Image (tube, rainbow, N blue to C red):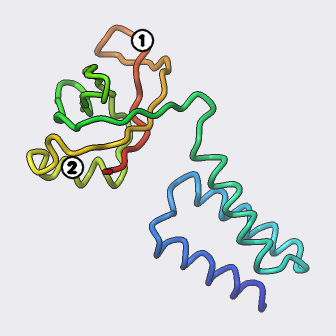
Amino acid sequence: MKNSWICIALLSLLFACGAASESSEENTADSTRQAEENPQMTEEEIEADITRKMEKSETPENQQSVSGMFTGIEQGDYFYFTIKTEAGEDMSFMVLQTDATFEAISENPEKYTNAMVKVYWETTTENIPEAGGDIEINKYIKAEIL
C-alpha cells in the first residue's frame, strides 16, 4: 500500500512539472506496474526508472538540432515552423505534432519573430496523402526559446 502512494505521488509530480506525454505516460505506467510487481523497489529506483525511460523515448536516434532566428509559421495542408539559421540558411520543419513551445508561439507569432530558438528535428519518410504518398520531410520534434 505504501508503494502505491509513492507511485501516485511521483505521478502527480510528473504531471505537475508538465513532463507527462503519451510516451511518458506509458513509461510511467510500466514503472508503476514494475513497482507493484516488485514491492522492494525504492522510491529512488522508481524515479530513476521513470527518468531513464522518458529520456530514451524523447530522443529519437536520428534527431538533430539547429539554432536560429524564428521567422514564422507557415500554413498550407500542414503547419511549418520556419527559422533562419546562424549560418543564414532558411529552414522549414513540418509540424505533425505540437509541443508547448509551438503552442505558445503560434498564439502570437509576431511576438516571437526574430527570437532565437533551438529546433529539434529529424529527417523522416512520412505518408503525406496531399503530396501523393511517402515523402522525405524535416519533421519538427520540439523547440526551445533561447
Number of the front mark, 1 or 2: 2
| Nearer-N-terminus badge (1/2) | 2
**Residue position marked by numbered label 1 in the rendering:** 135
Looking at the rendered structure, which numbered label has been put on residue 91?
none
- Taking the spot 50% from the left edge, 31% from the top edge, the residue there is 64
37 and 52: which is toward the camera: 52
Q: Residue furthest top?
A: 132
Coordinates of residue 136 in the picture (x, y in percent): 44, 13
> Measuring 35% from the left and 45% from the top, which residue is drawn there?
98
* Above/below status of 119 relative to 57: above
Residue 105: mark in rendering: 2
Q: Three-letter amino acid code at disc 1? A: Ile
Which residue is pictured at 63% across the width and 56% down the height? Answer: 26
In the rendered image, the vertical position of residue 108 relative to residue 37, given as above or below: above
Direction bottom: furthest residue: 2
Res. 34 image quadrant:
bottom right
Residue 101 drawn at (x, y percent): 31, 52
Residue displayed at 29% across by 25% down: 92
